[in-house]
Image: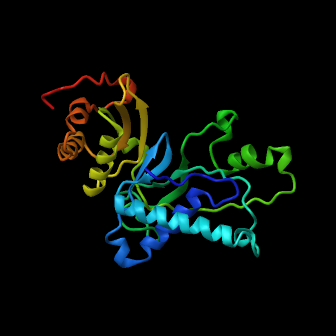
């Protein structure tokens, strides 16, 4: 499978994907027929699950990289500084509300009481600092930028992105794992999920004891029965179906269950 890799001095994959997906969403005829579900491997973007979308992405990214070579100063022209490093954190916006039965509020959205606190619940990451420092952007700047002597005098850009791809929190995701007879079966699974409009938000590959078998761990909001139904649509997908368990890969015996 052809993949776009990070390249020193070139636009980061995440930056190109943001532009690509915005173009899809802003074009009604494409937005209706171009699923943007992705497959991640070890927490990093691998490819779009829908093969047509992935083909469009590859063409877009190659054209983007080609334009950079023709116009090498394009990314650093004007007021936009050349990118030396990129670090990011993600979190979920949370509101704390009063009991609507006790406090009627005329300034906040109806049905939920008064909103008295708005915050971002940041995902856990290794800050290298004591817990009381928190996980927010101030700590990210201190850890990745201001805390490094080599960065003195460099410019820093802070960008806020409100993500629309999913509103599912980590607590609502279920962890699944299975064994497949080969990598192609895993690819067929991702395609089947895209067709069934079932999102896989994270995945991790591992080589099975017997090659060419591979193991997969992934997270999805879909219930077990839904994942099983998807696997039943895949020709020769019986090994994946019979070893599927709702548990991390480390806890899955990967023994086949013919009754699945």
Picture quarter containing residue 33? Answer: bottom left
Q: Is residue 192 left or right of 215 when viewed as pictured?
A: left
Furthest toward the left, the residue is 259
Image quadrant holding the C terminus, namely: top left
Query: How did the renderer colour the structure?
Result: rainbow
How many numbered discs, if any? 0
Residue 67 sits above or below residue 6 on the image: below
* Residue plotted at (81% across, 44% down): 148
**Left or right of 153, for residue 228:** left
Q: Is residue 195 left or right of residue 202?
A: left
Residue positioned 64% across, 62% down in the render: 159
Q: Is 38 or 148 nearer to us in this picture?
A: 38
Q: Residue at point 53% right, 50% down?
A: 91
Residue that appears at 61% across and 57% down: 12
Image x and y of residue 154, in percent: 83, 57
Expressed as whole percent of the image width and height from the top left, the position of residue 169 reads: 42, 48
Q: Is residue 166 left or right of residue 65?
A: left
The correct choice, above or below, for 25 with respect to 49 in the image is: below
Quarter of the image holding residue 16?
bottom right
- Answer above or below: position of 216 versus 21: above
Position of residue 87 measured from the top left corner of the image (x, y, whole percent): 65, 50
């Amino acid at each position: 499978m052809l993949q776009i890799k990070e390249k020193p001095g070139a636009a980061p994959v995440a930056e190109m994907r943001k532009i690509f997906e915005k173009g899809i969403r802003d074009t009604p005829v494409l937005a209706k027929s171009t699923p943007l579900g992705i497959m991640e491997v070890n927490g990093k973007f691998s490819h779009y699950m829908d093969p047509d979308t992935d083909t469009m992405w590859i063409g877009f990214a190659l054209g983007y990289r080609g334009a950079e070579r023709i116009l090498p100063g394009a990314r650093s022209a004007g007021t936009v500084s050349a990118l030396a490093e990129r670090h990011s954190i993600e979190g979920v916006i949370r509101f704390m509300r009063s009991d609507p039965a006790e406090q009627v509020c005329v300034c906040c959205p109806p049905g939920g009481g008064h909103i008295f606190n708005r915050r971002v619940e940041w995902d856990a990451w290794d800050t290298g600092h004591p817990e009381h420092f928190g996980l927010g952007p101030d700590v990210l700047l201190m850890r990745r930028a201001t805390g490094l002597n080599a960065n003195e005098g460099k410019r820093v850009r802070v960008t806020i992105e409100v993500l629309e791809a999913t509103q599912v929190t980590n607590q609502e995701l279920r962890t699944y794992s299975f064994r497949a007879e080969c990598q192609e079966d895993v690819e067929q699974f991702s395609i089947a999920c895209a067709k069934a409009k079932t999102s896989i938000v994270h995945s991790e590959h591992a080589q099975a004891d017997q090659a060419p078998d591979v193991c997969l761990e992934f997270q999805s909001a879909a219930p077990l029965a839904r994942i099983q139904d998807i696997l039943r649509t895949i020709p020769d997908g019986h090994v994946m179906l019979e070893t599927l368990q709702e548990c991390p890969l480390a806890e899955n015996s990967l023994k086949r269950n013919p009754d699945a």
